[in-house]
Image (cartoon, helix red, strand yellow):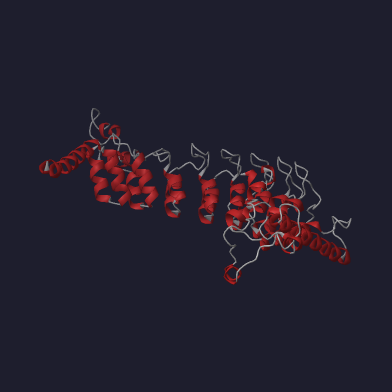
Amino acid sequence: MDIVKVLAPIAIKEATNYLSKRSTSPSTELAVAAGKGDTSAVKTILSQDDRIDLAPALVAASTAGKLDVLDILIEPPRRRYSSHSKSRGKGKGKRNHEDEDSEEEKSVIRTDVNVWSSNLTPLIAAVQTHHLKTTELLLDAGADPSLALKSTSETPLHIACRMGDLPIVKLLVQNSASLSARDAHLNTPLLVAARWRHPSVIEYLLEQGADIEATDAKGSTALLLACRHACVEAVKLLLNSGADVRVRDVRGRGPLHRVVEGVDFIEGVGAGVKEELVRVLLEKGADRRARDGEGRTAGERAGWLRGGDRVARLLSEGVRSGSASGSANGGRRSHDGLRDRERDRDRERRDKRYNPYGRTEGSHHHSSREGRHRHSPRERESGSPAIGSPRRPDLHRSVHRSRTDSPLADW
């Protein structure tokens, strides 16, 4: 049994090595060498097989940014001269060396770089790994910037905008990448840049003529997405570029509604940023009275925002006092009234939480002598009730909110 335990792992290892060697194709070996930047190995493998598939090696070299390897793969030695050019000298007499050289130079065969491997083209692989020089080399070699990922329909420009890589964005646009291309969710490159909070990319795309009012599958414009993801710089840029501040998506939500939604739960955006966005939008004419498809204003939605009491008050200014903006005194009275109402609501919530049967805190602590529980000094210090004392019922399960009230219902 001891011999079996010793020999079994060795046998498994040797069998695995044998099978892996048999299953490794020249194309795979070439891809590994290309990814490592081993130009010597690449040349050797190419010289041994003139029918090898170059696609995996092109993608591997593009992913790793190996320019020397790409130079070899795009014009490999085995394909530099066609057999047709070499055979033309036979049959009709000899030709001088200069004629042969010129004929061979004309018959150089370049590799098609618009190929797929592992669901990637070499250009997409270079873009998503931030290799600017590699991207430039591939475009010069004829890479098509319109070829999109089959799974998401993202073009290289979509990917560069998502990553905020402005130099590659500029390079792609200069090489005729489409500004109006749509991915699987109908996003244009501008919409992608707005969603991922890249103001510099947004500015460049607008300068190049991108449609500022283009919408995705949910009817969101670049402004709505910038508001949703709380990018103050992008919102200001879009508004100053003429974005419609009264735009609505398919659910009737405007910029103010999108600002107060719950991005703070996911991205750590605080109420201070939201408050600044609300002020910017109101200054540009956003309607605080506007209601979404569920009949709610942005102020009514702000209750879900962490620390959103200031935002709610800002959105309520003028609405309760009867004017769009409200006077200074009216706004102050509105603030005072809201503060009083919030204080009353907080007091009512506390009463209900600790006194589920309707008694007030005072009546609970000053009830009859028979019903009053006496605490020992140790209990008063620790704050824990004595054994056998009545426990408050757990009311957490009795508090319900409608799922449609949640800002995360949109996710």
Residue appearing at x 45%, y 54% in the figure: 132
Question: Image quadrant for the C terminus?
Answer: top right
**Location of residue 350 with respect to 110 vertically, above or below:** below
Q: Residue 101: x, y in percent?
A: 29, 42
- Residue 339 lies in what quarter of the image? bottom right
In the foreground, 379 or 317: 379
- The residue at the far top in this view is 91
- The residue at the far left in this view is 3
Question: Image quadrant for the N terminus?
Answer: top left
**Residue 354 located left or right of residue 332:** left
**Residue 384 located left or right of residue 107:** right
- Residue 373 lies in what quarter of the image? bottom right
In the foreground, 120 or 207: 120
Q: Residue 294: x, y in percent?
A: 75, 42
**Location of residue 305 with respect to 152 vertically, above or below:** below
Residue appearing at x 42%, y 51% in the figure: 134
- Residue 272 lies in what quarter of the image? bottom right
In the foreground, 408 or 347: 347
Q: Residue 208: x, y in percent?
A: 62, 51
**Residue 399 located left or right of residue 91:** right
Residue 269 seen in this snapshot: yes
Residue 283 seen in this snapshot: no
Q: Residue 111: x, y in percent?
A: 37, 40
